Amino acid sequence: MSFENYRQGSLDGVPFECVSRGSRGGRRVDVGEIPFGETWTTRDMGKRARRFQFDAFIFGKDWLTRAAQLEEALERGGVVRLVHPTRGELDVLIEEWSEREDENEALDERSYRIECVLSRDVELPAAEIHHRSAVSDAAAAVPEPVAAAFVSDWVPPDGEQINIVSDAVETDAIGSLDAFAAELRDLAQVPNPLAGAADALAAINELSANATALIRAPADLAFSFVSIVSGIRSAVLAPFQALLRLARFSIGLPDLDLGFSLGQAGDAIAVNRSALGQLVAANALAQAADAALDQSFPTFDDAIAARRDLADTIATVERTALVSRRRDVAIALQQLRAVSWTGLGDVAVSLPRLTDASANGRLSARALSWRIRGDIDAADDIVARNRLDHPAMLPPNRDLKVVTGGSDGRS
C-alpha cells in the first residue's frame, strides 16, 4: 500500500492520515410558498455556518492507542484544534463522526469520517440606542397619520348630508374650538412665561378669529392645531406637564358640556368632537414625549411617575384610534409609547431616590435633611414635596418623603 499521496493532519494533537476532504457553506434562504397560489417569496437570512468533512485513518503498530486518543478528542465536546491537511490550523466543534475497521495488505487500520463546524464566539450586536433621536423620530411620525385621520373624519357644517342641521354642527364646532382656545390661553399664561408665550397667544387668537372658516377646511384646521401645540412647548416653563394636561383635556372633549344640545345633529357633532380631541391629544402627547427628555426631574420617583402618566395617556388615545379603526394612528402612538418608556427609564436611573423618614422629636426641615443626607440641600424639597406648613417645625408622627441623594444622584 502506498501512502505517498496522503496528507497528514491532527485533531487535538492526535495525528492522522487524510486522503479526501471537503467543505460546505452557502446562504440561509427563507422560502415562503403562498397557499393556493402560484408564487412564493424569498428572504436571504445570512450565511450558513462553514462546515468541513474529511476522511482520516490511523495505521501502524500503535494504531489502537492513537485511535483511542482520537476518539476521546472526538467525544470530549467543546472547541478542539484541527490541523487541516490543506487549510492549516482551525478551531472547530465536532458535529458527527463514524469509524470503520479494515484489513488492507496486512496492515491494521481504522478509518474515520469526521464532520465539524468552524467555531465562532458569540457576537452580540453592539446596540447603541440614542433615546433622544428614537423619541424624536417617533414623535415626528405622529402628526401626519393623525392629521389624515382628522381630515377624513371631520364633518364640515355645510356638507350636503347634514344641510338640514348645519347650524347646530357649526355652532358646536365653533364652541369646541373656543373651548380649546381657552385651555391653550390658560396654558400659555403660566407664571413667568417664556418669550414664546406672546407668539403662542397670537396664534391662539388667530385660531379663534378664523374659526368659522377653519371648520369648513379641515386640512387647514389640522395644520393650525399642530402648529399651536408645537408653539405651546416653547411658550411655557414646564412644557411636559402643560402638554400632558392639554392631552387630557382633549381626551375629555367629547363628553365636555359646551352648552349645546346634540339634538338632530348629534352624530355629526359627536364625530367632530372625537376627531378634534384625537387630533390635539395625539399631537400634544408627541410633543410631551419629546419634552420629557428635557425635563429636570428632581428624583427617580418623579421621572418614573411621569413615565407612567405619559404612557397611560398615550394608551388611552391609542385605544380610541383602534376603536375608530385608525390602525396607522394606533401604530404611531404605540411606537411613541414604547420608546418614551425606555427613554424616560434611562433618564430616571441616574437620579436620586425618595425614601420615607419621620421627624422623631421636633426637627426642622434642615435638621431632617442633615440627619438623612449629611447636608441641608433637601430642606426646601421636603417642605414643598410634603406640603408642610412651616420649615422650622415638622410634624413628629408623619412619614415624610426625602430625597436620599445629592444633586449628583449619589445615595
Image (spheres, grey):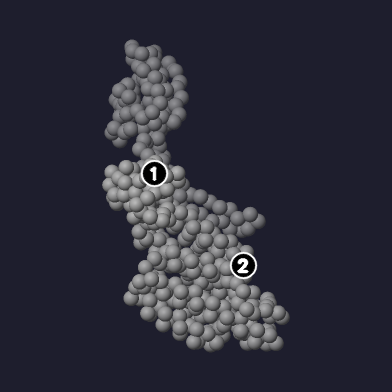
Residue 303 seen in render: no
* SS under mark 1: loop
Looking at the picture, tell me which residue is in the foreground, 222 or 84: 222
What is the CA distance from the residue labelled 1 to the residue labelled 2?
53 Å
Q: Is residue 301 above or below residue 111?
A: below
* SS under mark 2: loop
10 Å crowding of disc 2: few (<14), some (14-19), many (20+): some
10 Å crowding of disc 1: few (<14), some (14-19), many (20+): some
Q: Is residue 375 above or below residue 292?
A: above
Task: Residue at 36% x, 35% y: name it.
Answer: 119
The residue under label 2 is 324
Number of numbered discs: 2
Looking at the picture, tell me which residue is in the foreground, 177 or 191: 191
Residue 266 seen in render: yes
Q: Residue 87, percent across and down?
A: 30, 35
Q: Quadrant of the C terminus?
A: top left
Q: Is residue 375 above or below residue 275?
A: above
Q: Residue 178, percent across and down?
A: 53, 80
Looking at the picture, tell me which residue is in the foreground, 54 or 136: 136
Q: Which mark is residue 359?
A: 1
The quadrant holding residue 89 is top left
Residue 366 placement, left or right of 312: left
Label 2 sits on what residue type? Ser
Label 1 sits on what residue type? Ala
